[in-house]
Image: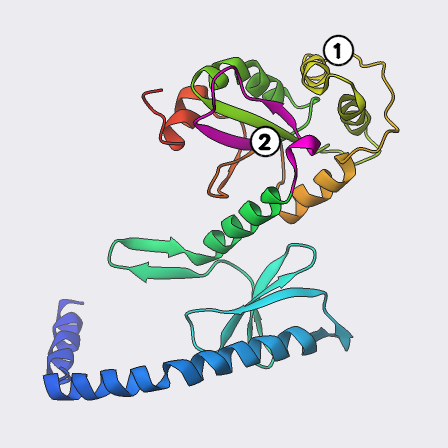
């Protein structure tokens, strides 16, 4: 192995780019940036319109160029994503990483984070169940919850401490067993309640709710959104930058993740 490494290093030295050649290459690259970008955009648009499987058009929501030449990130309406070549004849499923001097950067997860931020920003506070405490919050987390989930109950018990640390908690509904489950009905009752936060606390404590569940409520929409955003279990905590943190997180650790370690 050491001999192979030395051979590679020697070949690299022999191929060093001279200053004059480097200048010429830079000029050529700058002259071609705009045409290449325009071509990538045009290819992405064409792929979005023409992508098919078994002769059937795919429900494509968005196609974006990646840093890899000829490879495009395809996002479906369901929230699923994969990578395709320019003509849609080959697919790759998995995460795309950038190998930098400081380590690997998961570009796929970065894109998912941005999608989560945009999707959650579109949900008004009136459709959430909010616990913010007395003082102005320093940070806000969105939590997909299910009152029949033991770890959701544990997280809910920590909400007062989170509020004291300056962390507001915004609940969205995610009945793990689907919309025909007892959890779904319980959350619909909580959202239909005149005092949603009080009703949610009772539900998290496994107390039966007696109110109606047939009001105009967002539980089903939030459940579907959770699946689109990659939620697979509860609690699912989404940080302000869109990062999804699965499972229960102790208050001190969550505060540290939000840069509030001394709060």
| Residue found 85% across the figure and 14% down from its top | 210
Q: From where the camera sits, is residue 164 visible?
A: yes
Judge whether residue 126 is colored magenta: yes
Q: What is the spatial separation of the Cα atoms under label 1 and label 2, in whole angstroms? A: 20 Å
Instruction: State the residue position of label 1.
Output: 207
| Residue found 46% across the figure and 53% down from its top | 110
Instruction: State the residue position of label 2.
Output: 143
Which residue is more in the foreground, 128 or 250? 128
State the mark number for residue 67.
none
Q: Which element carries disc 2, helix, strand or loop?
A: strand
Instruction: Identify whether 49 is placed above or below 229.
Output: below
User: Is 18 positioned to the left or the right of 94 in the image?
Assistant: left
Residue 149 placed where, x, y %?
Answer: 66, 23
- Whether residues under marks 1 and 2 lie with C-beta atoms below 8 angstroms apart, the answer is no
Tally the marks.
Answer: 2
| Residue found 63% across the figure and 35% down from its top | 233
Which residue is more in the foreground, 206 or 44? 44
Instruction: Identify whether 206 is placed above or below 55.
Output: above
Which residue is more in the foreground, 36 or 16? 36
Quarter occupied by residue 9: bottom left
Q: Which span of residues is magenta-colored?
A: 123-142
Q: Earlier in the sequence, mark 1 or mark 2?
A: 2
Quarter occupied by residue 156: top right
């Amino acid at each position: 192995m050491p001999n192979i490494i030395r051979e590679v290093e020697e070949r690299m030295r022999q191929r060093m780019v001279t200053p004059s050649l480097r200048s010429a290459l830079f000029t050529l690259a700058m002259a071609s940036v705009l045409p290449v970008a325009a071509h990538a955009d045009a290819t992405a648009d064409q792929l979005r319109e023409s992508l098919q499987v078994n002769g059937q058009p795919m429900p494509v929501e968005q196609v974006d160029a990646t840093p890899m030449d000829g490879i495009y990130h395809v996002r479906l309406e369901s929230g699923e994503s994969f990578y395709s070549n320019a003509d849609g004849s080959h697919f790759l499923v998995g995460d795309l990483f950038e190998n930098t001097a400081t380590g690997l950067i998961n570009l796929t997860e970065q894109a998912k984070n941005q999608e989560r931020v945009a999707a959650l920003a579109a949900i008004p506070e009136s459709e959430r169940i909010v616990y913010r405490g007395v003082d102005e919050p320093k940070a806000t987390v969105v939590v997909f919850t299910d009152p029949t989930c033991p770890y959701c109950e544990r997280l809910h018990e920590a909400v007062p401490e989170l509020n004291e640390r300056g962390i507001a908690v915004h609940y969205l509904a995610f009945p793990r067993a689907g919309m025909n489950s007892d959890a779904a009905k319980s959350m619909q009752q909580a959202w239909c309640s005149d005092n949603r936060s009080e009703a949610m606390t009772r539900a998290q404590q496994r107390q039966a709710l007696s109110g109606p569940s047939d009001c105009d409520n967002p539980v089903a929409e939030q459940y579907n959104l959770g699946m689109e955003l990659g939620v697979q279990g509860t609690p699912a905590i989404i940080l302000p930058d869109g990062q999804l943190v699965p499972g229960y997180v102790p208050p001190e650790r969550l505060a540290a993740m939000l840069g509030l370690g001394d709060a």
